[in-house]
Amino acid sequence: MFDFLKIDPVAFTIPIGGGLDIFWYGIIVTVGIGLGIWWAGREIEKRGENLDDLYNGALIVIIAGFICARLWYVFQDAVLDGNSGNYGNLLDIINIRNGGVNILGGFVGAFIIGLIWIRRKKLKPWPFMDAAGPALLIAQAIGRWGNLINQELYGPPTGSSTWGLLIDAPNRIAPYNNLATYPLETRFHPTFFYESMWLLAGFIILTVLSGRKRDEWKPGTLFALFLIWWGAGRTWIEFFRPDQPGFEGSAITFSMIFALLIAGAGVVLLLHLYERINLPGIRRRRRRQDRIRSRSRTIN
């Protein structure tokens, strides 16, 4: 399974200096982001907002997301997993080819920067957040296929001779790099595939619901459902992530807890939106926005 997709991770090389390799992973991630922004653009227009505001904000949020995703990855690897020796200087820290990035940390950073940008522009936050949720699902669903080419994001052995990934020796992580115990014909769970399918299903479901319920649901509902779907999915995916740092002697990883908190935040937000509980901070901001709109109508 998937064996026919084994290709060179380097798509092409730009003749600059000693040669700058361009990887398929980066190309696939870029395609995913582009498709996500395209969908968000269509959705934001249907919600009556300015498309240029979305594009301008997306550029800032994407940059912030990559920076925070890298910093969280380094923090997990260096501090939580004890691999501080991997980051001897600033270049090692910012070099995403030295390890990678963590999407959960990137999301939190992008979310915070996005909220700051929205407030500075005095825009309504919920339409942009409702558009951003499903866009992230489809972007990541596509981007995960870059992990296949890199032979990464795989789980434990499947115990099957047909289902799973064949991982070359240089791409094995411990303990699976012990070829005496895990020979080259050992197949591993395609964790990237499980997550990609979960994300794609979430995107389809939320897109259909948005089309049918856009004018009925309260603003913010789609974003809350996105948080629940994404967080819940990443929680069970973590059981197939032996590469993630966690609590010693336990299957619980730090990313699993992080993902549970994201899903929990979605549940709390949904309960707040439909007045089952009150979140005073959000309520105050809503009232302030209502007063601003009221004054604007009076002036006009």
Image (tube, grey):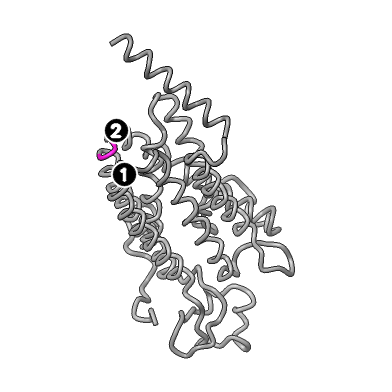
Q: Nearer the viewer, residue 88 or 270?
A: 270
Q: Is residue 20 something one can see in this rendering?
A: no
Nearer-N-terminus badge (1/2): 2
Q: Is residue 220 something one can see in this rendering?
A: yes
Quadrant of the rendering where the C terminus is positioned: top left
Q: Please, is residue 108 above or below residue 284 in the view?
A: below
Q: Nearer the viewer, residue 212 or 198?
A: 212
Q: Going 63% across and 52% down the picture, which residue do you hit?
A: 87
Taking the magenta stretch, the answer to whether it contains residue 235 is no
Residue 252 image offset from top left, x and y in percent: 66, 64
- Residue furthest out toward the front: 276
Reading the image, the residue beneath label 2 is 49
Reading the image, the residue beneath label 1 is 214
Question: Does residue 214 appear left or right of residue 159 in this picture?
Answer: left
Q: Going 43% across and 45% down the picture, which residue do you hit?
A: 223
Q: Going 40% across and 55% down the picture, which residue do you hit?
A: 137
Taking the magenta stretch, the answer to whether it contains residue 49 is yes
Quadrant of the rendering where the N terminus is positioned: bottom left
Residue 269 image offset from top left, x and y in percent: 52, 43
Q: Please, is residue 136 above or below residue 117 in the view?
A: below
In magenta, the rendered stretch is 46-50
Q: Give the prevailing secondary structure in the magenta stretch.
A: loop
Name the residue type under label 1.
Arg
Q: Please, is residue 4 above or below residue 239 in the view?
A: below
Name the residue type under label 2.
Glu
